[in-house]
Amino acid sequence: MRTTGKAASRWIMDRVIEIANNQLFSTSLQICEIAGNMGFATSSDFCKYYRTYTGLTPMQYRKACLKQGTLINID
């Protein structure tokens, strides 16, 4: 068993954001499609969750990544 030093809820949150970030950067899926892929009932719920964790909306993150040409690490 591997220890991360994080609470399980924080590890899950980190993983959800990591997967979302990859989809935002590497696909042309709409935000609502990514929200559905991530198990959120609505894109609004996903956007609130994402913004609470990262300080950016998913669209702001996508635009920043496209401008820089790479994934942006948000911690």
Image: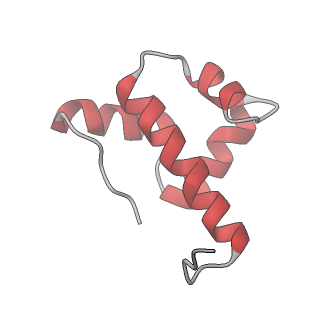
Query: Does residue 43 appear anywhere in the picture?
Result: yes
| Residue in front for this viewpoint, 42 or 38 | 38
The residue at the far front in this view is 1
66 lies left or right of 50:
left
Image coordinates of residue 59 in percent, x first then y, are 45, 32
Residue in the foreground of this view, choosing between 19 and 31? 19
Residue situated furthest right in the rendering = 41
- Quarter residue 13 falls in: bottom right
Residue drawn at x 17%, y 38% is 68
Estimate the x, y position of residue 37 in percent, counting from the top left. 67, 27
Q: Residue 58: where, in percent of width, then height?
A: 50, 38
Q: Quadrant of residue 15?
A: bottom right
Q: Against 10, is 29 above or below?
A: above
User: Which residue is at 71% across, 34% downward?
Assistant: 44
Give the residue drawn at x 77%, y 29%: 42
The correct choice, above or below, for 14 with respect to 50 in the image is below
Q: Is residue 44 left or right of residue 63?
A: right
Image quadrant in which the C terminus is located: bottom left
Q: Residue at x 44, y 31 (%)?
A: 24
Rendered position, 60 above or below 37: below
Q: Nearer the viewer, residue 34 or 11?
A: 11
Residue 27, above or below 67: above
Q: Is residue 42 left or right of residue 7?
A: right
- What percent of the width, then of the height, locates residue 20? 53, 39
